[in-house]
Image (cartoon, rainbow, N blue to C red):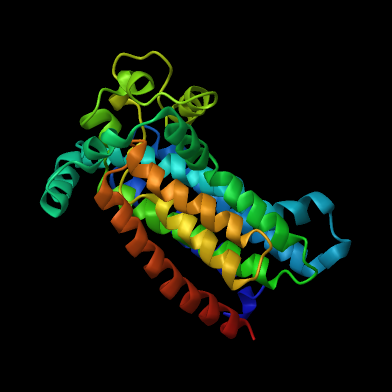
């Protein structure tokens, strides 16, 4: 293992997940039209990770600035690339969605459909606040890792990156195993959302932006056919809690801001109809497993490099 000591733990889990995803795509190649393209892109991604890590390890701060920047921040576009890949192929692998199972679990646990129950509390001010909180998801990580990156010692930055990227990949496994589109398509009229849950100023625009990012083209008559299958678990819940954990564990200045906005974000997942309540509960369990196993993996890899 020491011969690969230039790799960080986040690099290792990324390479392993990309390899595992490629194997899945090869196995189900008869159902996935672009399987070959995905596999080739995954190979290119892993090659870039390996070569840039080796280059920066050899040249240090004297190496090419662009390569060093890629080395530190490639995980941002990587997470988005692998998310789009995993959440889109799962529909072709299973050839069905499992929303009916999640709805049944919610009704068994709570006796109601939580998103329908939450509608009684709908108010434009509440909607505006929660929509903004939900939309701030990726800002969490930008703000968190910008602060960690500015520190002279990048140990916390690398440790936090490992937990976040590992947590994202775990959530993608959930998407691959149990594809679902969420209650805004199954329990509610998707195109009535703006009427039933109106905000004040930003809600409609933020909602449209999120719909687009989730794969739903504007104005299509069958949005459920396009949306990514990423309801279970609630990655917003899981990774928001991971970000809050890192913020407090590393003593960042923004930890209380993350706690307040993150708590609102978790509430918004059900109120805004993006997730079933069981998705949120699963996201919390995935969070606990992410921290427990992620810390062990990071420690094991770094210990082996010594």
The image shows a total of numbered marks equal to 0
**Is there any visible trace of residue 92 in the rendered image?**
no
Tell me the quarter of the picture where residue 7 sits. Answer: bottom right
Q: Is residue 136 left or right of residue 87?
A: right
Front-lying residue, 293 or 284: 284
Residue 273 seen: yes
Tell which residue pokes out farthest to the right in this image. 62
Vertical position of residue 258 compared to residue 115: above or below: below
- x%, y% of residue 54? 71, 65
Name the foreground residue: 88 vs 56. Answer: 88
Q: Residue at x 56, y 79 (%)?
A: 1
Is 292 left, or right, of 70 in this rendering?
left
Q: Residue at x 58, y 72 (%)?
A: 249
User: Residue 44's x, y, as percent?
Assistant: 57, 48
Q: Nearer the viewer, residue 230 or 176?
A: 230
Viewer-proximal residue, 302 or 197?
A: 197
Query: Relative to residue 7, is residue 44 depicted above or below?
Result: above
Kindly identify the residue that appears in the image at 34 percent across and 23 percent down: 193
Q: Identify the residue at horizontal 71%, vertical 51% (top origin).
A: 70
Location of the C terminus (image quadrant): bottom right
């Amino acid at each position: 293992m020491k011969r690969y000591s230039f790799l960080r733990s986040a690099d290792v889990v990324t390479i392993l997940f990309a390899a595992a995803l490629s194997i899945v795509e090869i196995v189900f190649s008869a159902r996935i039209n672009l399987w070959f393209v995905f596999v080739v892109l995954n190979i290119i991604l892993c090659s870039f990770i390996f070569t840039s890590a080796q280059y920066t390890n050899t040249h240090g701060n004297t190496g090419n600035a662009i390569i060093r920047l890629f080395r530190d921040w490639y995980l941002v576009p990587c997470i988005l690339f692998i998310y789009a890949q995993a959440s889109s192929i799962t529909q072709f692998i299973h050839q069905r969605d499992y929303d009916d199972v999640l709805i049944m679990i919610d009704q068994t646990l709570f006796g109601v459909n939580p998103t329908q129950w939450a509608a009684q509390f709908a108010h434009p001010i509440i909607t505006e606040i929660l929509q903004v909180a939900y939309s701030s998801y990726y800002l969490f990580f930008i703000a968190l890792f910008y602060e960690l990156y500015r520190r002279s010692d990048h140990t916390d930055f690398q440790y936090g990156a490992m937990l976040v990227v590992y947590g994202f990949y775990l959530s993608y496994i959930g998407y691959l195993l149990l594809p679902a589109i969420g209650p805004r398509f199954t329990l509610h009229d998707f195109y009535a959302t703006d009427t039933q849950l109106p905000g004040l100023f930003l809600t409609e625009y933020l909602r449209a932006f999120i719909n687009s990012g989730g794969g739903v083209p504007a104005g299509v008559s069958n949005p459920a056919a396009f949306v990514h299958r990423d309801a279970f678990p609630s990655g917003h819940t899981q990774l928001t809690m991971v970000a809050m954990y890192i913020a407090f564990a590393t003593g960042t200045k923004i930890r209380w801001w993350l706690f307040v906005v993150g708590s609102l974000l978790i509430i918004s997942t059900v109120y805004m109809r993006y997730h079933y309540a069981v998705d949120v509960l699963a996201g919390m369990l995935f969070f606990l497993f992410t921290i427990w196993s992620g810390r062990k993996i990071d420690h094991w890899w770094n210990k082996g490099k010594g």
